[in-house]
Image (tube, rainbow, N blue to C red):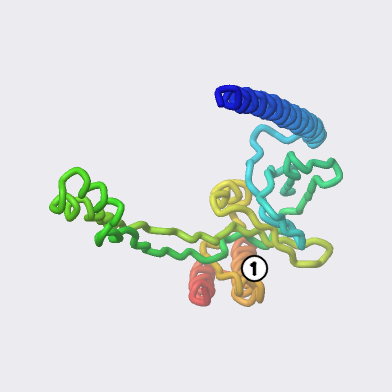
Amino acid sequence: MGGMAIAIFVLIIIIMLIQSDFSADKEEERLNESMKKASKLNKLYEEREEAIQEYAIPAQAKELNAISCGNQEFYQPRESFLWMNDNHLNVLILPIVERFHKDDIIHKIIKYDDIAFHFNAGELHTENKIEGGGGGGADLGGAAVGGLFFGGAGAIIGSQKKIDPVTSKMLVHDKRETVIKYLENDQELFMKFKLDTMHKITSLIPHKQINQVFKPEEVKSGKKINQKETIDNRLRKLKKLWEEELITDNEYAEKKSEIFKDI
């Protein structure tokens, strides 16, 4: 009997050693795989940095996160840079590091006059979520333990479940984004960025901003946006007439007031 016990003990030790060696091999394999991935990622990052140098991004360029460009939607936001140069808006959108390829870099140079305007689009929803208030009632496990230590009365005490406190949490669903509308080969296109970039774009093209948030369906149809564009053009033409002294100050103020009524 004692010999059998010793044999079983030795067998257990052997199994544990085999498992230990197997685990060590697995750990080494995982470590090698991680190092390969890190090396590949580092190489892609170096290629990306080298490619960026070719575009001579100025120090004052604005760094943003692009969501889409023209007809191309990105499955996740992409790092991008915007800057003005010789009355042109430069937009450089980079592929993510993990999938970087030089040919996937997007560089657009848009004439200032070809930029219609930029604005915020999308919807913001808030939701008040109530949590907690659960618990209470009987807990048989708690009752059994309580009974062992304190008898019948202890069973009653031990069976009481703790009631969770009621908490209120405000959830924000923000689907808004900042959009630039521009012309390319006589085609109206949109470029979208994360919402928190509005002030950066405004600092580059301040006279192209529309202070209104549009719903997604309005952006698709373009009805209200085109109305805004018409107003912008009307104001520009009116100002030109006034600067050329073709209308008086009073006429300029009166006409401008009429245009603002259409907003």
Type of the residue with mark 1: Asn
Q: Which residue is drawn at 66% across and 58% down?
A: 180
In the rendered image of this protein, does residue 106 appear above or below residue 1?
A: below
Task: Name the secondary structure under disc 1.
Answer: helix
**Residue 141 image position (x, y, % from top left):** 30, 52
Specify whether 29 is left or right of 60: right
Q: Is residue 133 visible?
A: yes
Q: Specify the farthest residue to the left.
A: 153
Specify whether 160 is left or right of 97: left
Q: Name the residue under label 1.
A: 233
Indicate the quadrant containing the N terminus: top left, top right, bottom left or bottom right: top right
Choose top left, top right, bottom left or bottom right for residue 214.
bottom right
Choose top left, top right, bottom left or bottom right for residue 27.
top right
Q: Nearest the camera: 37 or 13?
A: 13
**Residue 175 image position (x, y, % from top left):** 54, 61
In the rendered image of this protein, does residue 98 appear above or below residue 154?
A: above
Give the tally of numbered discs.
1
